[in-house]
Amino acid sequence: MKSQEEHRQWNREHVHWLEDLDRWHKEHDQMTASLETISQQLKEHEELYAEHKGKMVAHEQKIAHHQHSLDSSKESGTDQSSHDESRKEHEKQAKLHAALKERHEAIMATFGQLEKALQKPLGGS
Protein backbone atom coordinates (compact mmCIF):
# COMPACT_ATOMS: atom_id res chain seq x y z
CA MET A 1 0.00 0.00 0.00
CA LYS A 2 2.70 2.41 0.92
CA SER A 3 4.41 1.98 -2.46
CA GLN A 4 1.13 2.73 -4.29
CA GLU A 5 0.73 6.01 -2.39
CA GLU A 6 4.34 6.85 -3.12
CA HIS A 7 3.77 6.17 -6.82
CA ARG A 8 0.70 8.43 -6.82
CA GLN A 9 2.75 11.15 -5.15
CA TRP A 10 5.48 10.74 -7.77
CA ASN A 11 2.87 10.93 -10.51
CA ARG A 12 1.51 14.21 -9.11
CA GLU A 13 5.05 15.61 -8.96
CA HIS A 14 5.74 14.47 -12.51
CA VAL A 15 2.59 16.22 -13.76
CA HIS A 16 3.79 19.46 -12.13
CA TRP A 17 7.28 19.00 -13.52
CA LEU A 18 5.93 18.50 -17.03
CA GLU A 19 3.81 21.63 -16.65
CA ASP A 20 6.91 23.51 -15.48
CA LEU A 21 8.90 22.29 -18.47
CA ASP A 22 6.18 23.33 -20.93
CA ARG A 23 5.95 26.77 -19.28
CA TRP A 24 9.74 27.18 -19.25
CA HIS A 25 9.89 26.29 -22.93
CA LYS A 26 7.34 29.00 -23.75
CA GLU A 27 9.18 31.50 -21.54
CA HIS A 28 12.49 30.70 -23.23
CA ASP A 29 10.88 31.23 -26.63
CA GLN A 30 9.62 34.60 -25.43
CA MET A 31 13.05 35.42 -24.01
CA THR A 32 14.72 34.53 -27.31
CA ALA A 33 12.43 36.97 -29.10
CA SER A 34 13.19 39.59 -26.44
CA LEU A 35 16.93 39.00 -26.82
CA GLU A 36 16.62 39.73 -30.54
CA THR A 37 14.94 43.04 -29.66
CA ILE A 38 17.62 43.74 -27.05
CA SER A 39 20.32 43.00 -29.61
CA GLN A 40 18.83 45.64 -31.91
CA GLN A 41 18.64 48.10 -29.02
CA LEU A 42 22.31 47.48 -28.22
CA LYS A 43 23.18 48.30 -31.82
CA GLU A 44 21.25 51.55 -31.45
CA HIS A 45 23.25 52.26 -28.29
CA GLU A 46 26.43 51.79 -30.30
CA GLU A 47 25.16 54.49 -32.63
CA LEU A 48 24.58 56.76 -29.62
CA TYR A 49 28.11 56.04 -28.39
CA ALA A 50 29.57 56.86 -31.81
CA GLU A 51 27.52 60.06 -32.03
CA HIS A 52 28.60 61.08 -28.52
CA LYS A 53 32.23 60.35 -29.38
CA GLY A 54 31.99 62.45 -32.55
CA LYS A 55 30.52 65.36 -30.60
CA MET A 56 33.25 65.04 -27.99
CA VAL A 57 36.00 65.09 -30.62
CA ALA A 58 34.42 68.16 -32.27
CA HIS A 59 34.08 69.80 -28.86
CA GLU A 60 37.75 69.14 -28.10
CA GLN A 61 38.78 70.62 -31.44
CA LYS A 62 36.65 73.69 -30.82
CA ILE A 63 38.21 74.15 -27.38
CA ALA A 64 41.71 73.83 -28.85
CA HIS A 65 40.86 76.39 -31.53
CA HIS A 66 39.34 78.70 -28.92
CA GLN A 67 42.42 78.36 -26.69
CA HIS A 68 44.69 79.07 -29.65
CA SER A 69 42.66 82.20 -30.40
CA LEU A 70 42.97 83.31 -26.78
CA ASP A 71 46.71 82.63 -26.77
CA SER A 72 47.24 84.66 -29.96
CA SER A 73 45.12 87.54 -28.79
CA LYS A 74 46.05 89.96 -26.05
CA GLU A 75 42.37 90.46 -25.26
CA SER A 76 41.04 87.46 -23.38
CA GLY A 77 37.42 88.65 -23.38
CA THR A 78 37.00 88.98 -27.13
CA ASP A 79 35.25 85.67 -27.68
CA GLN A 80 33.07 85.23 -24.56
CA SER A 81 30.03 84.04 -26.56
CA SER A 82 32.07 81.23 -28.08
CA HIS A 83 33.31 80.27 -24.63
CA ASP A 84 29.75 80.28 -23.24
CA GLU A 85 28.61 78.11 -26.15
CA SER A 86 31.45 75.68 -25.45
CA ARG A 87 30.48 75.56 -21.76
CA LYS A 88 26.87 74.73 -22.66
CA GLU A 89 27.98 72.00 -25.06
CA HIS A 90 30.33 70.61 -22.42
CA GLU A 91 27.53 70.50 -19.83
CA LYS A 92 25.17 68.85 -22.32
CA GLN A 93 27.75 66.19 -23.21
CA ALA A 94 28.62 65.65 -19.54
CA LYS A 95 24.96 64.88 -18.75
CA LEU A 96 24.67 62.57 -21.75
CA HIS A 97 27.92 60.82 -20.83
CA ALA A 98 26.74 60.24 -17.25
CA ALA A 99 23.42 58.80 -18.48
CA LEU A 100 25.16 56.55 -21.02
CA LYS A 101 27.62 55.36 -18.37
CA GLU A 102 24.86 54.57 -15.88
CA ARG A 103 22.88 52.63 -18.48
CA HIS A 104 25.97 50.81 -19.76
CA GLU A 105 26.96 49.72 -16.26
CA ALA A 106 23.42 48.48 -15.51
CA ILE A 107 23.28 46.55 -18.79
CA MET A 108 26.69 44.98 -18.24
CA ALA A 109 25.86 43.98 -14.66
CA THR A 110 22.59 42.38 -15.76
CA PHE A 111 24.31 40.61 -18.65
CA GLY A 112 26.99 39.35 -16.27
CA GLN A 113 24.30 37.89 -13.99
CA LEU A 114 22.63 36.20 -16.95
CA GLU A 115 25.91 34.72 -18.15
CA LYS A 116 26.75 33.50 -14.67
CA ALA A 117 23.30 31.91 -14.23
CA LEU A 118 23.60 30.09 -17.57
CA GLN A 119 27.09 28.79 -16.77
CA LYS A 120 26.20 27.51 -13.32
CA PRO A 121 26.36 23.71 -13.35
CA LEU A 122 23.12 21.86 -12.69
CA GLY A 123 22.62 18.83 -10.50
CA GLY A 124 22.18 15.37 -12.03
CA SER A 125 19.99 15.05 -15.09
Image (spheres, rainbow, N blue to C red):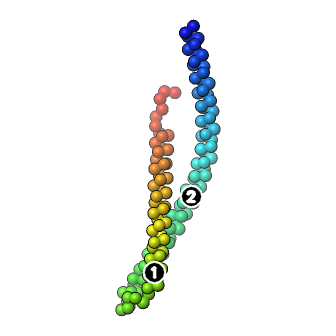
Relative to residue 93, is residue 9 depicted above or below? Answer: above
In the figure, is residue 109 to the left or right of 45?
Answer: left
In the displayed orientation, state which residue is furthest to the top.
1
The kind of residue tagged 2 is Lys
In the displayed orientation, state which residue is furthest to the bottom.
74
**Looking at the rendering, which quadrant does residue 66 occupy?**
bottom left
Q: Residue 84 carries which label?
A: 1
Please name the residue shown 62% across and 30% down the image: 19
The kind of residue tagged 1 is Asp
Please name the residue shown 60% across and 40% down the image: 28
The reply to whether residue 9 is visible in this rendering is yes
Residue 93 vs residue 114, the one in the foreground: 93
Residue 123 vs residue 101, the one in the foreground: 101
Please name the residue shown 47% across and 84% down the image: 81
Q: Under tag 2, what secondary structure?
A: helix
Query: How many angstroms separate mark 1 from mark 2 (CA)?
Result: 34 Å
In the figure, is residue 11 to the left or right of 50?
Answer: right
**Looking at the rendering, which quadrant does residue 79 occupy?**
bottom left
- Circle 2: is it few (<14), some (14-19), or many (20+) Cα within 10 Å? few
Q: Would you say the residues marked 1 and 2 are in contact, meaning their CB atoms lie under 8 Å apart?
A: no
Residue where numbered disc 2 is placed: 43
- Circle 1: is it few (<14), some (14-19), or many (20+) Cα within 10 Å? few
Relative to residue 93, is residue 106 depicted above or below? Answer: above
In the image, residue 45 lies at what x, y percent?
Answer: 54, 60
Relative to residue 30, is residue 11 depicted above or below? Answer: above
Q: Earlier in the sequence, mark 1 or mark 2?
A: 2
